[in-house]
Amino acid sequence: MQSNHLKGLVETALPAIAAADAASLEELRVSLLGKNGNVTLLLKSLGGMDAEARKTAGAEINHAKMQITDALSARRAVLDSQALEQKLAAERIDVTQPPRPDSAGALHPLSRTQEELAAIFAAMGFAIAEGPDIESDWNNFSALNIPSHHPARAMMDTFYLTGDQVLRTHTSPVQIRTMLEWAKTEGLGESPAPIRIIVPGRTFRADHDATHSPMFHQCEGLVIGQGITLGHLKGCLIDFLRAYFGLPELPVRLRSSYFPFTEPSMEVDIGWNRKTGELGGGTDWLEIGGSGMVHPNVLANCGIDPRRFQGFAFGMGLERITMLKHGIADLRLFYESDVRWLRHYGASPLTPASLHEGL
Ligand code: PHE
C-alpha cells in the first residue's frame, strides 16, 4: 500500500520535474522535500513503524528521495545553463571592426601629389609651411624684390582686392612670412637651426586655357642657413625629382633664367621625349619650375643679414608635375569633379604616400 503510494508519487514527480521552469521547480521541491513535503512526511511516518517494516520502507523512501533529489538538481542544471546562454546572447557585443570600404571615394590626384611631396621632403628634413590665399601686395611682390613698376608684375597678373591685397600669384610670399618669423627668433641666435620648408598651396593668376587655370597649385621650397650653396639646391632638386617620378636616372638640368627674388636664377628642366611624352628618355627638355639663390635684398627685407646667411628657393606647379606623372592631358579636368575621372586618377586614401613602399 505504502510502496504503491510511493511509486505513484515518484512517477508523477519525475516527469513534472523534467518539464518544470525555474519557479515551478522550486514549488515542486517544497511540495516533495520541504518541511511538510510528501516525501518528508513519509520519512516522518517511519517513526511509527515496527523495526522490520521501517527497514524496508526506509530503504524505499530513501531511494525515492534520492531519485527526486537527482532529478531536481539535473533539471536545475539545465535551467541554469539555459539562463546563462540567454544572458550571454543578450549581452553579446561585436568587438570586431567593420571591413574597410574599398571602393568608396578616392584622393584627388593633386592631394596625392601634395602627400608625396611631403613624404619626400620630410625625409630631407623639410617641414610644411602654409600661408593665406589673400596676401598683402608687399608679401606677394615688394618684399620679393618686385617693386610696383616692375614688369614681372604683369607676368603674374592677378586679382586685386581692396586695401592693397591680392590673391597670391605664387607660394613665394610664404618665404617672406617664414623668414620674418625666423629672423625674430631663431635667426638672432649663435648657431641658428636653418629654415627648411616646403609650401604646397593654391595660387591665382588671370589666365585660362588648356594648360592654365585662374586657380592652380604650386609648391615652394626654401632653405636658409649658413654655408648654403647652389650645389645644395641642385642636389635637393635632383633627389626630389627622381624620387617623385620614380626614375633614378631622370636627367635634370638647371638653365639660367631670371626671377627678381633670386640671384642667380635658374629654370628647372627634366629630360623627356616630346613626341612620345616619355619621361627620362629622349633628348628634349621640359621646364617644370623655377629656382635660385635667395636674393640678398629679399633676405634684408626680412631682417636677415645676407652676409651671415644664404639660401635657396624653388617653386613648381603641382598640376604640371601631376599631369606629367600620370599622363593627364588637360589641366581643366582637375577641377571638373567628374567622378569617372576621379575614380581613374584618384589614389586610395588607405595607402598613404610612403617612401618605403614606393610612391
Ligand atoms: N615664384 C616663382 C613663380 O611662380 C617660382 C620660383 C620660386 C622661382 C622660387 C624661384 C624661386 O614663377
Image: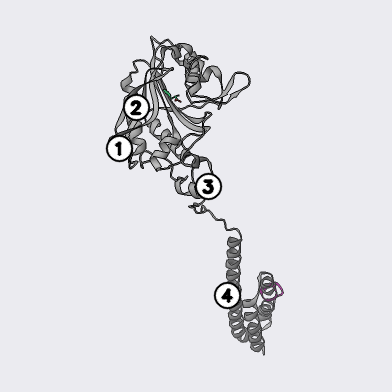
The three-letter amino acid code for the residue at tag 3 is: Asp
The quadrant of the image that shows the N terminus is: bottom right
Residue 268 visible in the picture: yes
Magenta run includes residue 31: yes
Which element carries disc 2, helix, strand or loop? helix
The three-letter amino acid code for the residue at tag 2 is: Cys
Distance between mark 2 and mark 3 Cα atoms: 36 Å
Residue 187 lies in quadrant:
top left
- For discs 4 and 3, the disc positioned in front in the rendered view: 3
Distance between mark 1 and mark 2 Cα atoms: 18 Å
Other-residue count near label 3 (Cα within 10 Å), few / some / many at <14 / 14–19 / ≥20: few
Describe residue 147's horizontal placement relative to residue 3 as left or right.
left
CB of residue at label 2: within 8 Å of ligand 1? no
Q: Using the image as rendered, state which of residue 108 and residue 341 is in the foreground.
A: 341
Residues rendered magenta in the picture: 30-36
Q: How many marks?
A: 4
Q: Is residue 188 above or below residue 28?
A: above
**Residue matched to label 4:** 70
- On residue 170, the disc is none
Sooner in the amino-acid sequence: mark 4 or mark 3: 4
Describe residue 51's horizontal placement relative to residue 151 as left or right.
right
Sooner in the amino-acid sequence: mark 1 or mark 3: 1
| Ligand 1 quadrant in view | top left
**Residue matched to label 1:** 280
Sooner in the amino-acid sequence: mark 1 or mark 2: 2
- For discs 2 and 3, the disc positioned in front in the rendered view: 3
Which element carries disc 1, helix, strand or loop? loop
Q: Is residue 101 above or below residue 139?
A: below
**Residue matched to label 3:** 338
Distance between mark 1 and mark 3 Cα atoms: 30 Å
Other-residue count near label 4 (Cα within 10 Å), few / some / many at <14 / 14–19 / ≥20: few
**Residue matched to label 2:** 236
